[in-house]
Amino acid sequence: MIIGNIGRGKKEINEDDKFNIILDKIAKKVNVSEGRRAVEDIIRIIFREQPISTKKIAQKTRLPLPIVAKVRAMLEREKILKRNKGAILTDLGEKLAKEYLKLRYRGSLICDKCKGRGIILDEFFKEILNKAEKYFKKRPSPNTLIDQSFATLETSVYRVALMCERGDLEGRRIMFVGDDDLTSIPAALTGFADEIAVVDIDERILRIIEEFSKEEDVKIKIVKHDLRKPLPNDLKDSFDTISTDPPYTLNGLRLFLSRGIEALGKEGVAYLSYSHKPIEEFLLVQKAINEMNFVISELIPNFNYYEGSEIIANTTFIARLIGKDLKPNIGDTEKIYTGLVKPVIRYYKCLKCGKIYKLLNERIEDLKCSCGSRKFRMVKREKL
Amino acid sequence: MIIGNIGRGKKEINEDDKFNIILDKIAKKVNVSEGRRAVEDIIRIIFREQPISTKKIAQKTRLPLPIVAKVRAMLEREKILKRNKGAILTDLGEKLAKEYLKLRYRGSLICDKCKGRGIILDEFFKEILNKAEKYFKKRPSPNTLIDQSFATLETSVYRVALMCERGDLEGRRIMFVGDDDLTSIPAALTGFADEIAVVDIDERILRIIEEFSKEEDVKIKIVKHDLRKPLPNDLKDSFDTISTDPPYTLNGLRLFLSRGIEALGKEGVAYLSYSHKPIEEFLLVQKAINEMNFVISELIPNFNYYEGSEIIANTTFIARLIGKDLKPNIGDTEKIYTGLVKPVIRYYKCLKCGKIYKLLNERIEDLKCSCGSRKFRMVKREKL
């Protein structure tokens, strides 16, 4: 619309067009499902909360950390932002935000009391959090090969509070379909459930829960089981509520929810913790949920936080699903873990001697450098 | 398990069995989709918050008011509860709650700051609430024949706050697909949106918005339009965000969302306010949403409250939908209003002379008794 100034003999394009080109270029380069919207989301969050860390941007935008890191680097190259104790907008960046994106609002409307969860912990649940802490400290390092990633203690207690508030805890028979988050521990500490069962493949996890159950003298049914196989018969059709935080693949979701359905029988409630996904993938997830005859009765983004697990930016949603005439729907039971569905080569640099290691199916936790160090930094990820 | 006492020469069945039979009987009689769970939900809410009004029970359980009223009456007949400034449990009811349903928790874990919405109003939005109030007071009586039912002023402001927080307000072009809730007014008062348009069939509503836009000197595009017909061409593919609170029928949802898609074009965000539905119906709703290529990125129950509209217990959810490669999917455009899909005869009693009136498609607001009174009480509803 506006004809640019004539500068140094060349016709310049106007500022809006320039910003438009930059954002389009970045959206295309990072190739994110949300496109331009993702790039704009990142700029908006920085505009509101600068200085802000890359991880916090990823949490707030619910975008994968590598995507945010890539966009941030490109915005830096375009002189839209700089780093000073976190990302902050340059004068040019402020101009883009205010004049081109027309951003006006600084700050946050997320409830500071419940952190957007809608649920709070009262004294009773705070006490449970304190009691549970010592068992959460005993957790080993997560086995990333089976997509383990440990929810924070607070997250697990909030989950139980949500179950309680919605009427899915008191007098209910609850099964944890996989429980590396140890959510069964605060659940058992309430003393509200009629029965609690935990099914997991990892003995290290089961041992902590067993120890807890002995020390606190509470009854938990602990079953070591590979969920790729059907549930043992005595666990079938015997529960009212299930809780699961499955591998974040479509097959992982279908498998874990289907085993949950075996536990519930024809009807019941499921608490599903799952990663915020790109639109196309998320759509498949929701269709799979509906196909089993589960309805999403609520979905709270950023409900769960995790220790470590940088890639998913340490936060996932929780959904409360209500099922009737439930039908299991199991896909390929072999391809349930992220590493098998989307193999990624990760390059790690030894922080002591600088040597580079290439990992595919190995866990960084098991790596020891030839110089003796165990401290590494990931320097690159590459899809196979 | 326990053999009952021998009383008055008869063998008694034990208390648990008795409670079981009562709950089953009630669930069967009210024929609610959620079955036993619905009856248990009602008892749990009374256990936690007694004394409590029928309307509040309906809000908390998200069950239709007539269902709750029916269950409450049956529980009263079974001497499980009595009324004393609201429903309270009898000794027998307390026994059922504590010993049979094993309820333990009294109180509520809903965040008292945000009322479970996860979003708060800061000073800026509180100011907007104050400014908007006078226009909300001008609303006429709702036309229930076209499923009008007015959201509270607070609800509309919270919706705008949610849009702002999620990045769907600032610099965005927003269309309200039907706006009897006047949400366009607080939206316009922020001054954050790039463009605001309202499409509605009701001139009374449009006139209030027009008056507002003149008095406050803000630009809103106001279009009188019957959404059963496609959007005018100049409104197509021109918006980033839509907001709608459609008729609570499957066809109503599909029609309003589809017109929203015409406004958005291939992608965009939709704020959908919609009634909590029985599982089977809710499942169809979610499948319809997914079929249009909208994904439910969050779903907050009890977000919206309404003035009047007793049947839906004055509360609905809001869902933020993100769409990509959007496809409209319009069903039967004639059967979009509740009264046409599920015709109901309502019987009203004149509070002055006692005369009974039978209403099908007529609105109670238009009724005047032969004795001159305009005050009535609904005494019965009957499905056709």
Image: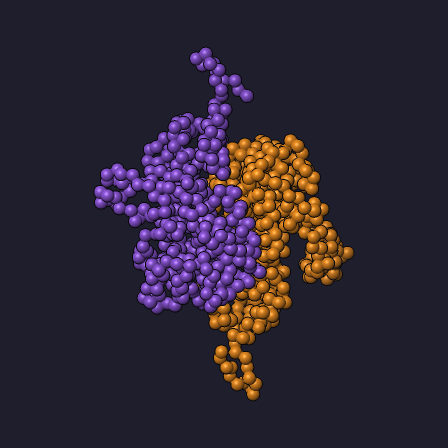
Chain colours: A purple, B orange
Q: Position of residue B378 (x, y in %)?
A: 68, 59
B99 or B33: nearer the eye? B33
Residue drawn at 30 percent across, 57 percent down: A138
Q: Is residue B60 visible?
A: no
Q: Quadrant of residue A209?
A: bottom left
Residue A62 in view (yes/no): yes
**Quadrant in which the C terminus of chain A appears:** top left
Residue A14 or residue A327, whichever sits in front: A327
> Which residue sits at x=41%, y=47%?
A339
Vertical comparison of A24 with B87: above or below: above
Relative depth, front residue between B183 and A76: A76
Residue found farthest to the right: B370
Given residues A331 and A314, the one toward you in this image is A331
Screen quadrant of the N terminus of chain A: top right
Q: Is residue A31 above or below residue A114?
A: above
Direction bottom: furthest residue: B9
Measured as percent of width and height from the top left, residue A175 is found at 45, 62
- In percent of width and height, residue A69 lies at 39, 36
Q: Residue at x 55, y 36 (%)?
A: B240
Residue A20, position as x, y percentages in the image: 49, 27
Q: To which quarter of the image does residue B37 belong?
A: bottom right
